[in-house]
Amino acid sequence: MDSFTIFLILLTLGFVFGKLAESRHYRSIHAREKMFLHIPTTSCKKPMGDRASIGQAQLVYGHVVISIDYFKQVLAGLRNFFGGTIQSYETLLDRARREAVLRLKESCPTANEILNLRIETASISKGGSGDRVRSVEVFAYGTAIYYQQAAPQRPLQ
Amino acid sequence: MFVSNIEDIPGKTITTCYGIVSGSTVRAKHIGRDIFAGIKNIFGGELKGYTELLGESRDQALDRMKAQARQLGANAIVNVRFSTSSIAAGAAEIYVYGTAVTVE
């Protein structure tokens, strides 16, 4: 009975704090995405502007590790039994990807364009035994393009 | 050192190609971070310790790749790719590779 009580407590904690964290995170994602709408980001390799006017190109990247809460973990476990889409993991990955891309953009706020954006996902807790940490790492990288008139003052490395 | 993940450095021309350069790191998280992450696993949210750790490893892998390119006499690396793999419980390998070139 004791372990069942602990399970219930963990479930409630996960539900309440997980939900709070998620909605807070989504609010910040929406706000920051609006801020960075002026940087066109593509997965193409060709710059949209004139090639001759490019002043600087630079590798930029951003990444985040996000963990799932206990409630969703249990929910996903149940889903695994019955089959079907696991929505709790879908939102986790969505948040992680958008956050990684946002951090990439935050590292180059004066860029005119971001080319060849690639997103990579890794589950860093794979292969663990016992109480594994269920978390996901998303890494986004691309090439930031600065056109000549808006080249940054920062010297090259 | 110019670095990009497209086939060239826009605005410059490639004059010499030196071939593949790469860098990698394998890092483990220390036990304190693991315990903290375990707690965070109940509540959900970002695991800042892991984010930091992977960021450091990635910078180190990049530095190693740049050092290798410098040794060859290159001044740029194009078509850079990253890959991450977890080789054991609690350890992650970051591998980064690209083509070392000279641009003008």
Image: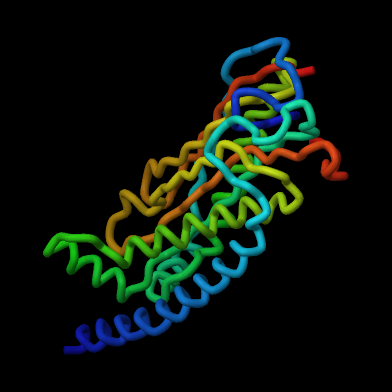
Q: Establish if A138 lies above or below A46.
A: below
| In this view, A16 is above or below A94 | below
Compare residues A52 and A130 and report the one nearer the observer.
A52
Is residue B50 in view?
no
Residue B84: x percent and y percent?
46, 41
Residue at 74 percent across and 16 percent down: it is: B73
| Residue closest to the eye, B63 or A121 | A121
User: Taking B78 as reference, is A56 above or below it?
Assistant: below
Q: Residue, x 60% and y 69% (percent of image)?
A: A31
Find residue A79 and report its horizontal and vertical position in percent: 18, 65
Q: Quadrant of residue B79?
A: top right
Give x and y (percent) for residue A100: 54, 54
Q: Residue A45 occupies which quadrant of the picture?
A: top right
Residue B23 placement (x, y as % from top left): 58, 30
Residue at (73%, 17%) from the top-left corner? Answer: B13
**Left-right relation of A134 to A28:** left
Residue A1 appears in the picture as rendered: yes
Count of marks placed on residues:
0
Kindly identify the residue that appears in the image at 60 percent across and 32 percent down.
B5
Which image quarter holds the C terminus of chain A? top right
Q: How is the image coloured?
A: rainbow
Q: In the orientation shown, which residue stands out farthest toward the left?
A: A82
Residue B22 to residue A68: above or below: above
